[in-house]
Image: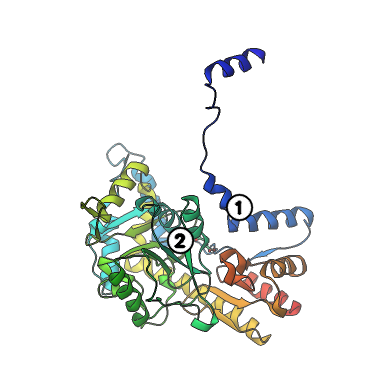
Amino acid sequence: MMIIVFLIRTTIKEGYIMPKLNENYLNLKESYLFSEIAHRVNKYIADNPDKKVIRLGIGDVTLPIGSTVIEQLHEGVDALASAETFKGYGPDHGYAFLRDAIVDYYRQNNVSIAADEVFVSDGAKSDTGNITDLFDQDNIILIPDPVYPVYVDTNIMNGRNITYINADETNHFLPMPDHSIHADIIYICSPNNPTGAAYNKEQLKEWVDYALENEALILFDAAYECFITDTSLPRSIFAIEGSRKCAIEFCSLSKTAGFTGTRCGYTIVPKDLKFTSSTGVEMSLNAMWSRRQSTKFNGVSYIVQKGAAAVFSEKGMAQCRENIKYYQENAKIIADGLTQKGIHCFGGVNSPYIWFKCPNDMDSWDFFDELLTKAQVVGTPGAGFGKNGQKFFRLTSFGNRENTIEAMARITKLL
Ligand code: MLT
């Protein structure tokens, strides 16, 4: 022991006794929203092992992945078993068969993108967080409140200031640009997590026009596009004229195809996205993201990409749609139950999430505790998504049918 202390003392120069940490982490809440919920629920279960807890909190799917995708996942595994078909490192940004399938999926929705604008990844969560690598500290960042906490937390980790825009009942949870203020980077999630609200084409056009006017960039999270039932609503920011010059889109197969555990998503960075550096050099966001990903990320496994490509086949997509329909029916069960109790809810139509005001003006964490301890149902407190969520609550439709019905019976009994 004495020897170790002596060695440490002699190898450290005075004044340089420890690594300097990223102190921006001190500005974060102690744990990530869904980790905090898991922690509270696990404690409750440990203390009450006889109770059956139903989880309608985190948006985690429960139905199995469709057979067409499963077959391709198996084929991917088999390919690794023989020298002739074995795969090691894959192409930096995804296999051509998957990038082409994604391009084709967009084409079916009348949106034109190129394969080298598609970057395959392990999901929208990582990409919406990692994209912050491309930006200087000195940006005005606009984030709606409430919102998916990853946008906020990752900017705090980088020490960036955030300007919040209110999403509340007065604007139907769809904030519009304030032309009197300037922003450099704007986060939009539509259909929205957590409120379930979805922008129409005219509203998104206004955001695109605002971004173009301000030479700003929209970071558009389309992770829930497959839940859009109203065919007049845009499923991609690239359905909006002018967006190729001002938007990046993130999407994920987590909810579309049940890939929450399998992990696969993609980010679309148009080649038209070019901005000028402080020294007058033209910088391409597509080239920067390519550089960032090939340096820090080794891609998604061949097996998973084989399965992911099958999602976009006719049969694969039909099976995904069946699962989505099932979750949409769950959403209706939840919304009907709440409505019967006189609770007005939002979302659940073009989105898997139902968003509503906590009864009796309760604070959302108090309502969370009440639901957990009195009805053994887990939801997500709105406060976790921002200050405007303080009195709101989110339930997910991703549970199984039996549990959803049971949870609603318990909730409506309690209300
Ligand atoms: C949610 O419940 O908000 C989502 O499942 C979280 C995620 O997709 O990371």
Q: CA distance from mark 1 to mark 2?
A: 23 Å
Q: Residues within 10 Å of mark 1 (few under 14, many from 20)?
A: few
The color scheme shown is rainbow
Local SS, label 1? loop
Q: Give the mark count.
A: 2
Q: Is residue 389 left or right of residue 174?
A: right
The residue nearer to you, when weighing 343 against 205, is 205
Local SS, label 2? helix
The earlier-in-sequence mark between 1 and 2 is: 1
The CB of the residue at mark 2 lies under 8 Å from ligand 1: yes
Give the amino acid type for the residue marked by disc 2 in the picture.
Answer: Ser
Q: Residue at x 35, y 52 (%)?
A: 134
Q: Is residue 38 left or right of residue 102?
A: right
Marker disc for residue 39: none
Give the quarter of the figure containing the N terminus.
top right
Q: Which residue is mark 1?
A: 31
Give the amino acid type for the residue marked by disc 1 in the picture.
Answer: Ser
The residue nearer to you, when weighing 81 against 281, is 281
Q: Is residue 162 visible?
A: yes
- Say above or below: 287 vs 5: below
Where is residue 210? Give x, y as percent: 33, 74
Where is residue 366? Give x, y as percent: 72, 68
- Say above or below: 295 vs 413: above
Q: Residue furthest top?
A: 3
Q: Which residue is mark 2?
A: 254
Where is residue 410? Give x, y as percent: 72, 74
Quadrant housing residue 218: bottom left
Q: Residue at x 64, y 73 (%)?
A: 391
- Residues tagged 1 and 2 counted as in contact (Cβ below 8 A): no
Give the quarter of the figure containing the C terminus.
bottom right
- Say above or below: 60 vs 14: below
Quadrant housing residue 106: bottom left
